[in-house]
């Protein structure tokens, strides 16, 4: 049985790494060197404080290494459990939807790819971060970077492209949310409210100008609206140019929530596929499937 | 002069609050109506499905005329019912009558195995799920609207213009039944 979250086993890794001969040697040598150099150049106070600073720095580095190790072991376990494989060059996804193209700098972690449940579709799962640069007023201070983190699941659904030219669903932002960076700013989108007060209080739904609103309302049938309103993850959605991105803010770091995210992506992709099938059946003059 | 300005400012604030509150009531009421039309659409879809279902069953189980007649009558009553409690009761009777078809199907293996019957039953099951979901949306909207107009000081604005709406009850007898637990 593997770790259930990215922090599980971190303490064990920390203790194991701290107990390694190389770490102990570094601690002893580093503290001794700091003591000698502190005494030689800074006096008694520096001689006392320098070894402590060196020990704290080394322990902090060991903690960071243990943290990364535990995280990597967890994601390896996630991949093994789900039958996923790492995928490379996630930057190719940055042209797909506005979120994945947001900000001035983007980075990816734990990129995995594999089957999306029983749907026959392929999912790409990753931790994604974009950063926004705030230019410094002068040359002396560096630019300020603000980062925004998400866990995303991307599914290619080319068949849905003509029916859904642009659909953006995310959790409603409060009054202070307006101060945050909005990657949809400047796009020609219109806000839509559905029939459920609860849904409208929870989510903010925006669509591209070419989006057929009737089709959108068929997609959001009552079951789907209730499902979104009651889902514990509050899944956010972007669907543009045949790419469906189901995402949640922050990095998911436990297996249960990873599975929830994938199940949510499967459910939403299933709705798109069903709508496309229904539209094709209607065009062909056949009775639409239930 | 200062006193007059203060009074005018307060009156303006009260006026603004009345307008905003009134608008929020209208929005909430419109959402209730919109949710009702969502239920109505799903119920009409179910009404449209019933004749096909009755015809299919008739082909395999012509002797079950009483069950089929009950379904047809319940459908007609549901289509003719108004709204609110009457509509709920009529739809509930239709649900019970449709349960009778499920019982009939158990006695006719050929009917149960028929592709068209299975398709219709799958559609019916999906529609019933959609009706349940639409009902939950409607009732949640009604609760939100009723709470909004009944809270003080909102009641001062609501007056007699905005009245509380009824929930739409559509629980099948099976749902209401308390399960017997044996120890």
Image: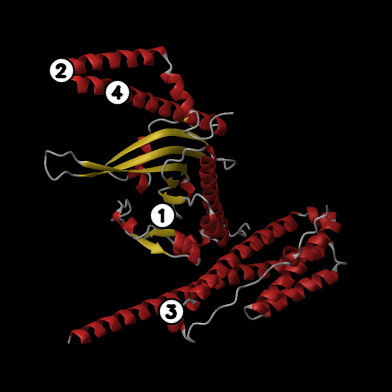
Give residue A41's mark: 2
Residue A35 at x, y percent in the picture: 24, 16
Label 2 and label 4 in one chain: yes
Q: The residue tagged with tag 2: helix, strand or loop?
A: helix
Report the residue marked by disc 4.
A52
The answer for how far apart the CA atoms under marks 1 and 3 are is: 37 Å
Q: Give the label, 2 or 3, closer to the camera.
A: 2
Graded by Cα atoms within 10 Å as few (under 14), some (14 to 19) or many (20 or more), the crowding at tag 3 reads few
| Residue B100 sits above or below residue A44 on the image | below
The answer for how far apart the CA atoms under marks 2 and 4 are is: 16 Å
Work out whether residue A35 can be spotted: yes
Q: Earlier in the sequence, mark 2 or mark 1?
A: 2
Question: Quick one: A285 or A150, which is closer to the camera?
Answer: A150
**Residue at the image position 22 percent from the left and 19 percent from the top:** A47
Q: Give the label, 1 or 3, closer to the camera.
A: 3
Number of numbered markers: 4
Q: Earlier in the sequence, mark 2 or mark 4?
A: 2
Label 2 and label 3 in one chain: no
Report the residue marked by disc 1.
A168
The answer for how far apart the CA atoms under marks 2 and 1 are is: 61 Å
Q: The residue tagged with tag 4: helix, strand or loop?
A: helix
| Residue A103 sits above or below residue A12 on the image | below
Question: Quick one: A94 or A143, which is closer to the camera?
Answer: A143
The answer for how far apart the CA atoms under marks 2 and 3 are is: 74 Å
Question: Quick one: A115 or B149, which is closer to the camera?
Answer: B149
Graded by Cα atoms within 10 Å as few (under 14), some (14 to 19) or many (20 or more), the crowding at tag 4 reads some
Label 1 and label 3 in one chain: no
Graded by Cα atoms within 10 Å as few (under 14), some (14 to 19) or many (20 or more), the crowding at tag 2 reads few
Q: Give the label, 2 or 1, closer to the camera.
A: 2
């Amino acid at each position: 049985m593997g770790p259930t979250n990215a922090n599980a086993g971190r303490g064990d890794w920390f203790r194991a790494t701290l107990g390694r001969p190389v770490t102990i040697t570094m601690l002893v040598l580093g503290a001794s060197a700091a003591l000698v150099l502190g005494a030689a150049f800074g006096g008694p106070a520096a001689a006392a404080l320098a070894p402590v600073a060196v020990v704290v720095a080394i322990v902090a580095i060991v903690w960071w290494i243990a943290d990364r190790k535990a995280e990597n072991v967890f994601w390896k376990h996630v991949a093994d459990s789900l039958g996923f494989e790492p995928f490379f060059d996630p930057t190719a996804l940055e042209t797909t939807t506005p979120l994945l193209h947001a900000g001035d700098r983007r980075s990816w972690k734990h990129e995995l790819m594999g089957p999306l449940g029983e749907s026959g579709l392929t999912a790409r799962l990753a931790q994604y971060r974009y950063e926004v640069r705030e230019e410094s007023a002068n040359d002396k201070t560096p630019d300020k970077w603000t980062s925004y983190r998400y866990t995303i699941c991307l599914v290619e659904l080319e068949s849905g492209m003509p029916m859904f030219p642009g659909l953006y669903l995310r959790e409603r932002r409060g009054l202070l949310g307006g101060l945050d960076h909005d990657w949809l700013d400047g796009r020609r989108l219109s806000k839509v409210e559905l029939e459920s007060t609860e849904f409208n209080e929870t989510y903010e739904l925006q669509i591209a100008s070419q989006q057929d609103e009737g089709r959108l309302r068929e997609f959001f049938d009552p079951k789907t609206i209730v499902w979104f309103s009651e889902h514990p993850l509050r899944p956010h959605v972007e669907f543009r140019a045949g790419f469906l991105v189901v995402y949640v803010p922050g990095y998911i770091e436990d297996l249960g929530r990873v599975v929830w995210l994938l199940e949510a992506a499967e459910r939403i992709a299933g709705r798109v596929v069903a709508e496309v099938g229904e539209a094709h059946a209607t065009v062909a003059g056949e009775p639409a499937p239930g | 002069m200062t006193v007059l300005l203060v009074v005018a400012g307060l009156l303006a604030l009260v006026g603004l609050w009345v307008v905003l509150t009134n608008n929020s009531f209208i929005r909430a009421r419109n959402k209730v109506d919109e949710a009702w039309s969502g239920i109505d659409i799903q119920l009409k879809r179910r009404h449209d499905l019933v004749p096909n279902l009755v015809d299919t069953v008739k082909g395999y189980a012509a002797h079950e005329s009483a069950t089929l007649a009950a379904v047809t009558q319940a459908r007609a009553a549901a289509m003719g019912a108004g709204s609110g409690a009457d509509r709920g009761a009529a739809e509930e009777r239709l649900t019970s009558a449709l349960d009778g078809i499920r019982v009939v199907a158990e006695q006719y293996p050929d009917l149960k195995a028929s592709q068209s019957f299975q398709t219709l039953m799958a559609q019916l099951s999906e529609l019933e799920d959609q009706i349940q979901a639409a009902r939950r949306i409607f009732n949640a909207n009604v609760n939100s609207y009723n709470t909004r107009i009944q809270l003080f000081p909102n009641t001062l604005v609501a007056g007699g213009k905005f009245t509380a709406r009824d929930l739409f009850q559509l629980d099948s007898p099976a749902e209401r039944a308390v399960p017997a637990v044996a120890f």
